[in-house]
Image: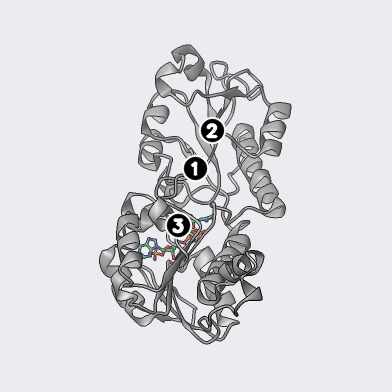
């Protein structure tokens, strides 16, 4: 895209706007390059004259550009999303208005897959709980209870995309049997495709969730899927809290219908329901991609997309829906 006389240059104040907090170094680099405005959290208080100047919004997967905010930005051309998940941005409206959306795939895959493995190992082996046991001085009087072997288990991967495949490869190195469920079988992988999430859960020792969030996958892991894991089965979720019916999960844990869970994501972050804070649940505060290296790579890719758009160059990583724009 090129600048026309009636379109403010990338350097014009307000062309680039920030929605929600961002990585400190990303905020700094944006400010060094552009005269960035910070959008208010409350869309009602957005000044229409300021809103009309905005051509680009930089945001994170946690905040996004939801319907009302996008509708209030009449000249918006691009949403550059820090994160691979962009379910908080109204992509349907973006497609309808020809607004581009970019995300940060691939660069975070390894760290998120590492996190999934850590959660799987921890729910089986209870390393976190055993460390708390030691710190609490309980080892002085007794040994830690025996746990479950992870190596050689059956791992069901729900969503075998970039992250799901990286999880499967790692689990395979632990001699796990890998099963997976996607809407379409993935070509070129040796692992068995299972048509439904319920059947996948029934056949797995641990179900690890790696599908995108959003309306299409809301509560995909419902009471029936959770129950299908059985009393020796575990649920691990590194995807989005919206994918798992959190109430059903709590109920299944409390009644012993499943053995435990490992969660990096929750339905209403950063709120974690009190009833989920249990000994048989490993809870992480959404740290899947949270390393210096990966967050810096995500920052650089976010900036590369923004710069490419404003310079009229091809976007490095548009989201798949942009094929229709
Ligand atoms: P991806 O490459 O697009 O993979 C998504 C996979 O999910 C695909 O295999 C897709 O296959 C499958 N899928 C989508 N809808 C499905 C459905 N209804 N039923 C079954 N399978 C379905 O995405 P990715 O890069 O691996 O990322 C996955 C998600 O991880 C992100 O969207 C994000 O929400 C989450 N994430 C979390 C963190 C964290 O910090 N915890 C960090 C990064 C990403 P089909 O299309 O064939 O169904």
Q: Which mark is residue 20?
A: 2
Category of crowding for the residue at label 2, using alpha-carbon neighbours closer than 10 angstroms: few (below 14), some (14–19), many (at least 20): some
Kindly state the secondary structure of the residue where label 1 is placed: loop
The reply to whether callout 3 and callout 2 are in contact (CB within 8 Å) is no
Question: Is 219 displayed left or right of 277 in the figure?
Answer: left
Question: Is 66 displayed left or right of 144 in the figure?
Answer: left
Depth check: 247 or 40 in front? 247
User: Which residue is pictured at 40% across the width and 42% down the height?
Assistant: 91
Question: Is 63 displayed left or right of 185 in the figure?
Answer: right
In the rendered view, would you say 228 is above or below 23?
A: below
Q: Nearer the viewer, mark 3 or mark 2?
A: 3
In the rendered view, would you say 53 is above or below 294?
A: above
Report how far apart the C-alphas of labels 1 and 3 lie in the structure. 22 Å
Q: Which mark is residue 214?
A: none
| Quarter of the image that includes the C terminus | top left
User: Which residue is pictured at 40% across the width and 74% down the height?
Assistant: 259
Q: Earlier in the sequence, mark 1 or mark 3?
A: 1
Q: Quadrant of residue 1?
A: top right
In the rendered view, would you say 165 is above or below 4?
A: below
Q: To which residue does mark 3 refer? A: 277
Q: Earlier in the sequence, mark 3 or mark 2?
A: 2
Q: To which residue does mark 1 refer? A: 62
Report how far apart the C-alphas of labels 1 and 2 lie in the structure. 8 Å
The reply to whether callout 1 and callout 2 are in contact (CB within 8 Å) is yes
Residue 10: % across, % down: 63, 25
Report how far apart the C-alphas of labels 3 and 2 lie in the structure. 28 Å
Residue 170: % across, % down: 59, 75
Category of crowding for the residue at label 3, using alpha-carbon neighbours closer than 10 angstroms: few (below 14), some (14–19), many (at least 20): few
Instruction: Indicate which quadrant contains ligand 1.
Output: bottom left
The reply to whether callout 1 and callout 3 are in contact (CB within 8 Å) is no
Kindly state the secondary structure of the residue where label 2 is placed: loop
């Amino acid at each position: 895209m090129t600048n026309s006389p009636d379109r403010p240059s990338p350097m014009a104040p307000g062309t680039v706007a920030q929605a929600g907090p961002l990585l400190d170094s990303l905020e700094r680099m944006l400010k060094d390059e552009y005269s960035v405005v910070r959008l208010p959290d409350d869309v009602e208080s957005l000044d229409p004259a300021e809103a009309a100047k905005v051509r680009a919004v930089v945001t994170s997967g946690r905040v996004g550009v939801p319907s009302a905010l996008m509708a209030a930005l009449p000249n918006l051309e691009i949403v550059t999303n820090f994160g691979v998940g962009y379910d908080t941005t109204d992509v349907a409206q973006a497609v309808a208005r020809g607004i581009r959306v970019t995300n940060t795939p691939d660069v975070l895959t390894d760290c998120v897959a590492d996190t999934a493995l850590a959660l799987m190992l921890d729910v089986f082996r209870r390393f976190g709980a055993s460390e708390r046991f030691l710190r609490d001085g309980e080892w002085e009087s007794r040994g830690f209870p025996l746990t479950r072997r992870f190596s050689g288990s059956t791992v069901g991967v729900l969503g075998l995309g970039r992250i799901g495949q990286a999880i499967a490869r790692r689990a395979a190195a632990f001699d796990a049997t890998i099963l997976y469920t996607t809407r379409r079988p993935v070509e070129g992988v040796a692992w068995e495709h299972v048509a439904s999430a319920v059947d996948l859960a029934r056949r797995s020792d641990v179900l690890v969730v790696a599908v995108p969030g959003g309306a299409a996958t809301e509560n995909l892991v419902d009471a029936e899927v959770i129950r299908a894991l059985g009393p020796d089965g575990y649920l691990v979720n590194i995807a989005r809290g919206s994918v798992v019916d959190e109430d059903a999960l709590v109920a299944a844990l409390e009644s012993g219908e499943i053995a435990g869970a490992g969660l990096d994501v929750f339905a209403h972050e950063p709120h974690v329901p009190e009833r989920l804070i249990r000994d048989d649940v490993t809870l992480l505060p959404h740290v899947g991609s949270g390393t210096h290296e990966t967050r810096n790579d995500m920052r650089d890719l976010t900036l590369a997309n923004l710069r490419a758009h404003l310079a009229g160059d091809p976007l490095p990583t548009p989201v798949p829906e942009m094929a229709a724009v």
